[in-house]
Image (tube, grey):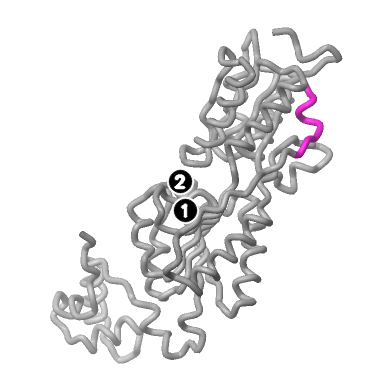
Amino acid sequence: MATKRPTIVDVAKKAGVSKSLVSLVMREAPGVSDERRAMVLRAADELGYRVNFAARSLTANPRSGKLVGFVIRDLEQPWASDVVDIIKPIIEDAGYTVLLTLFSPTNGSRRLDFSALDVLRDLRVTGLVFIGSMHDHPALNRVDFARAVVYSGWGPDGPTADAVRGNDQLGLQLVVDHLVGLGHRRIVHVSGIPGAVATDRADGYRRAMQRHGLREHLSVIQADYTISAGYAAAMHLLRDNPEPPTAITCADDMSAMGVMSAVAHLGLDVAVTGYDNIAMSALSQIDLTTVDQNNAEMAERSARALLARLEQPGAPFMTDVVRPRLVVRGSSFRGVTASGPSPA
């Protein structure tokens, strides 16, 4: 059972003052002594009380009831801003105001910060769009305050909201099929942060390798969706390895660029592939073979799903899976000689 949130009455009782005085303090109104203000703020802090921003602003906001919150998993990933740029104008054209929030803290921690949900609840948003893979977490069970919830990417297990996501298993199978077609056999996969996306992409790699009879070459290395993590994973894999892989598939483009840097640092000839088809992957210096999960289509379908849910809140929940496509560039042709890859 959820814990009852403290109210202004609770704060007044704990501080031993009137409700009206607490209200004055929370509104930062003048005329309250420093001593009494400190008493109220201390009581509020001990109770975990927060100001209800909606209660303060709803009467003054003519667009109240027309707010949609965007909750972004990781703004460091370039594709996230691309998705926002597509979804936002569609929602705004329908007459809604969009509020952007971020789940990832700025201190380098990979732990998600769910406090944004409390703020969005206070603001009484009508809809929520989660952008990026969201792990199962008890906090995601508290989003029933919104009339419409859409996960643009992987959401929690179970039919609790609409979701639009890519076919991540298929994406990695396309990559492995391409590499095997070039003659590669020793193919390694550098995975991402534990979660649905990383799991599905790694499963796609495994299935394709098994389908091609390459079970003995299966190898998945845990990393992160960053350049530095990709570099570290590749250095650990390749340094002093008497039989290095001829190709490395990565769960995203950023880690793939780190892998490419490590390969160059060690002076090796190894094919590298990514996932997401971010703008940098097409630069001639990088020329990264990657998977385009069709972010534009995913974003547009997510926006339409939210608007449809707002119109028909009682309709069955749906999951819309968007087909990815392989984008072949020069990076996958490294490690390949005229007669195939380096000898096994």
Query: What secondary structure is marked by label 2?
Result: loop
Q: Secondary structure at mark 1?
A: loop
For the N terminus, the quadrant is: bottom left
The magenta segment is 327-334
Residue type at numbered disc 2: Ser
Instruction: Provide residue 295's location: percent of width, then percent of height.
Output: 66, 53
Percent x, y of residue 241: 62, 12
Which residue is identified by label 1?
A: 105
Q: Horizontal placement of 23 versus 330: left or right?
A: left
- Residue at (62% x, 30% y) in the render: 231
Residue type beneath disc 1? Pro
The quadrant in which residue 179 appears is: top right
* Mark 2 neighbour class, 10 Å CA radius: few under 14, some 14 to 19, many 20 or more: few
**Quarter location, residue 237:** top right
Q: Residue 109: which numbered mark, if any?
A: 2
Relative to 65, residue 244 above or below: above
96 displayed left or right of 127:
right
Q: Is residue 75 left or right of residue 137?
A: right
In the picture, residue 31 is in which quadrant?
bottom left
The numbered mark at residue 56 is none
Discs 2, 1 touching: Cβ within 8 Å: yes
Magenta-drawn stretch contains 306: no
Residue at image coords 20%, 76% = 11
Please say whether residue 128 is visible from this viewpoint: yes
